[in-house]
Image (cartoon, rainbow, N blue to C red):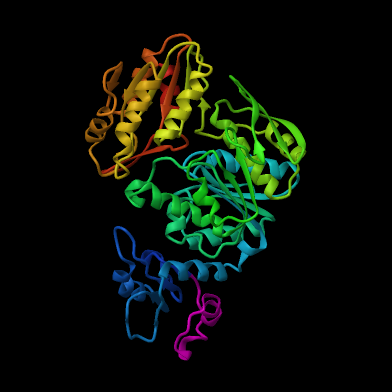
Amino acid sequence: MRLKTLLKETRTAVNEKIEDMEISDICYDSRKVTRGSLFVAIKGFKSDGHEYIEKAREMGAAIVVGEEVRNEDWYIRVPSSRKFLAMASKCFFENCADKMKIIGITGTNGKTTTSYLIKQILELKGIKCGLIGTNQILVGDEAIESERTTPESRELHELFKRMYECGAECVVMEVSSHSLELDRVYGINFEVGIFSNLTQDHLDFHETMGNYAKAKAKLFAMSKAAAINIDDKYAPIMLEGAKNVITYSVENPSEMKAENIRLRERGILFNVNYKGEERELRLGIPGGFSVYNALAAATGALCLGMSLEDIEKGLVIARGVKGRLEVVPTLTPYTVIIDYAHTPDGLENVIRAVRGFAKGRVITLFGCGGDRDRTKRPVMGSIAMKLSDYVIVTSDNPRSEEPALIIEDIIKGIGEGDYITIESRKDAIEYALDFAREGDVVILAGKGHETYQIFKEGTIHFDEREVVKEYLRK
């Protein structure tokens, strides 16, 4: 693609001598630069791309874009490297985001499950749909492992192109607060934006809940329509810039309100009324929070023009998501559940859901991630102790921190009660399986779909399903 095409799209003026240059690729990682590519220098948290400009040139970068002042003919200065990268990537990959309907879901909890529910509702109507999220990326029949909830803009637009070429008409994607704040989704015209909830998380990055909420709210200024959970106290912030809103709730008056809720061991049932039409919605995923996930998916589908009948049919056949209240197959008289709960609200939701059907004790095993918001650690310890019969505090992804110190932070909130600390997550899981009795439910919280653990020494393979299976085989 000619450079002047990208510059026109990004509204960037440069020296006429380089406008006709052919660009082979767009890169923001100097290690991935190829000859003839355009390198965008981005200021990150741990490193600054401007420090790698010379390396990028040595690797063959024809043009460099950055925010610092330089006088070279091959250098283009822009106000925001991140916004340039987003718009240039969109253009380079043929503006495929504009050729499909993009549905964005933001919030602390429920994004992954809601995204799968919407995908299943759409596909039941014969609408081909791509998916981008925490668990995985789905392009046609191909499943790709996710590195982060929302990819960087360059990879994101490459995915959009691949999905479009596979025949996708819609893309359902989780939109993280980081991606909104760091302009990874800048320039995308979302067909629908969905807000699930906002609870404590990522304060290591946003610092305050107010900043966190404002980052999330950016999605709705970019969306043609919005589905908003008005039971959440941060809903007014989301509503400020939202257009064509359909509200949903369990507790407050709304356009889509769940009533006559019935929680079952194997799922939920509830009634909704929208514009005079009433339907009973069923979902085979247990827990009170599943009502909100189903409502979010249903309301988002309404914003897309789907009928309540379409939604009812889609939800009734929907199945659970890997790592979200996932029951591990065992021949034991107790139940083992894996869940991704890694925030205070997420942990509370999953324990309360299990409480609704557990016949024996609820045994909760969890840890907290290193290099992340430390303030939530004692809060999660308090929640686990308050709602469980027994708590096992262990490691999650300690990253560069010492696992023992993270555990110390957690137990500050536990107080008195029945608990034990076991640093090795493998040993902790085996202890839980030995400790469980008939009728008990063991919750392995925090890792969910992940099949690894991250330590300062590196990343190791760690799949809790395998740990459970291998130990029980003994």
- In terms of depth relative to the viewer, which is nearer, 167 or 383? 383
Q: Which residues are magenta?
A: 1-25
Q: From the viewer's perspective, is residue 169 above or below residue 374?
A: below
Q: x, y (%) of residue 453?
A: 35, 38
Residue 415: x %, y % from top left: 26, 22
Q: In this orientation, which residue lies closer to the viewer: 261 or 96?
A: 261
Q: Position of residue 128 (x, y in %)?
A: 70, 50
In the image, what residue occupies the spot 36% across and 51% down? 206
Q: Check the image and report above or below for 174 versus 349.
A: below
Residue positioned 53% across, 17% down in the render: 357
Residue 447 visible to an observer of this rendering: no
- Residue at 63 percent of width and 41 percent of height: 297
Tell me which corner region of the image, top left, top right, bottom left or bottom right, holds residue 93.
Answer: bottom right
Quadrant, the C terminus: top left
Mark yes or no: residue 377 visible.
yes
Q: How many marks?
A: 0
* Residue 207 magenta-highlighted: no
The correct choice, above or below, for 66 with respect to 354 in the image is below
